[in-house]
């Protein structure tokens, strides 16, 4: 029996590769997340370069601080860690990919009003191929997400298609141009919803988001996770420090050392460009972009 999702939602996820659960999280949790963000915004005022906690926009200065991502927030915020282990986040994931789950990563993408960076079209699975694709990202929508403030966009059903080539001149560039592989831009849909909603997208779905040129910020907290029997393929961008470390990523259920294999045509995200490990930096290797760049 599913814990929280209806059979129609589960069928829709299987068919389309995404779901939006409107107003899924209560206001007090949303307020706590916003207070945590304010703490990291203060921290950003004191630095001039990105570090292992904070990823800064290219235009960031101490005078005009511009934070584009809080990295691994579950490691630096107890509140965000507790939310990750809660049924708010895990129950829908269990309904979609089973009871045994490991964390892949967490991140809080800050698309600030007026300049928040675009994320070019990509598939998460191209960054971290695994032995099977029971992999998804739960996105906690922190600000009302509208067409104007750079919503996450997906190509419905693309999680059932190819894993596209994300390389430029033989080097991993973390994105591609949908029109060049036969995807029609008018098929892309925006995952909109009021603050407190949650989006879920499949690890293979093609997704991206434009610059935020509106006067409203657009922040999303992502928890990316997979079935415990999905093991990274060699060359995946998964941080792998041995099985003991890997087992510390268990979110719920039982770990295993028996990977489940699915026949998926994959590419390895190698060689990597010589840049810091950040999607924004990796995508600078693109020669063509679908979205604008920040000023
Ligand atoms: O924040 C967004 O709109 C897209 C995020 C994303 O796809 C990523 O960080 O991999």
Image (spheres, rainbow, N blue to C red):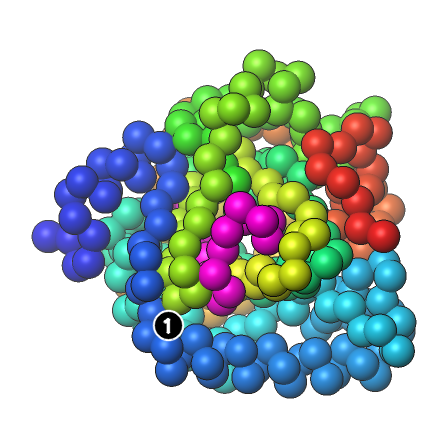
Q: Is residue 181 left or right of residue 295?
A: left
To which quarter of the image does residue 156 belong? top left
Which residue bears the numbered disc 1?
A: 85
Residue in view at x 40 percent, y 50 percent: 200
The answer to whether residue 149 is magenta is yes
Q: Is mark 1 within 8 Å of ligand 1?
A: no
Tell me where the magenta segment starts and ends, as one range: 134-151
Element at label 1: loop
Does residue 146 belong to the magenta stretch? yes
Q: Residue 76's spot in the image, x, y percent? A: 60, 80
The front one of 91 and 37 is 37
Q: In front: 160, or 177?
A: 177
Q: Is residue 171 above or below residue 212?
A: above
Residue neighbourhood size for the residue with mark 1, other residues' Cα within 10 Å, grouped as few (<14), some (14–19), many (≥20): some
- Position in image of residue 91 (x %, y %): 26, 61
Give the answer, above or below, for where 288 lies relative to 28. Answer: above
Q: Residue at x 70, y 32 (%)?
A: 290
Q: In the image, 254: left or right of 152?
A: left
In depth, the one of 222 and 291 nearer the eye is 291
Total count of labels: 1
Residue 94 in view, yes or no? yes
Residue reaching furthest left?
1
Image quadrant assignment for residue 41 = bottom right
Q: Residue at x 67, y 80 (%)?
A: 40
> Residue at coordinates 80% horizontally, 50% vertically from top-left?
294
């Amino acid at each position: 029996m599913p814990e929280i999702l209806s059979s129609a939602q589960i069928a829709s996820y299987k068919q389309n590769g995404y779901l939006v659960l409107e107003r899924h999280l209560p206001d007090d949790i949303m307020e706590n997340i916003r207070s945590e963000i304010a703490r990291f915004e203060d921290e950003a005022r004191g630095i001039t370069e990105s570090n292992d906690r904070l990823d800064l926009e290219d235009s960031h200065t101490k005078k005009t601080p511009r934070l584009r991502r809080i990295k691994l927030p579950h490691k630096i915020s107890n509140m965000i860690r507790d939310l990750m282990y809660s049924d708010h986040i895990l129950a829908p994931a269990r309904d979609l990919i089973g009871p045994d789950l490991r964390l892949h990563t967490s991140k809080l993408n800050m698309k600030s009003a007026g300049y928040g960076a675009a994320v070019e079209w990509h598939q998460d699975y191209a960054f971290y191929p695994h032995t099977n694709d029971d992999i998804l990202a739960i996105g906690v929508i922190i600000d009302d997400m509208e067409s104007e403030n750079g919503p996450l966009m997906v190509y419905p059903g693309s999680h059932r298609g190819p894993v596209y080539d994300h390389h430029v001149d033989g080097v991993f560039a973390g994105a591609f141009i949908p029109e060049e592989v036969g995807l029609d831009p008018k098929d892309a849909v925006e995952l909109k919803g009021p603050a407190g909603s949650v989006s879920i997208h499949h690890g293979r779905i093609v997704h991206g988001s434009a610059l935020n040129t509106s006067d409203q910020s657009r922040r999303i907290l992502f928890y990316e996770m997979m079935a415990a029997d999905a093991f990274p393929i060699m060359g995946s961008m998964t941080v792998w420090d041995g099985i003991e470390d890997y087992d510390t990523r268990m979110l719920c259920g039982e770990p295993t050392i028996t990977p489940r294999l699915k026949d998926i045509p994959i590419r390895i995200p190698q060689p990597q460009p010589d840049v810091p490990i950040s999607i924004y930096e990796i995508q600078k290797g693109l020669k063509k972009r679908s979205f604008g760049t920040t000023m």
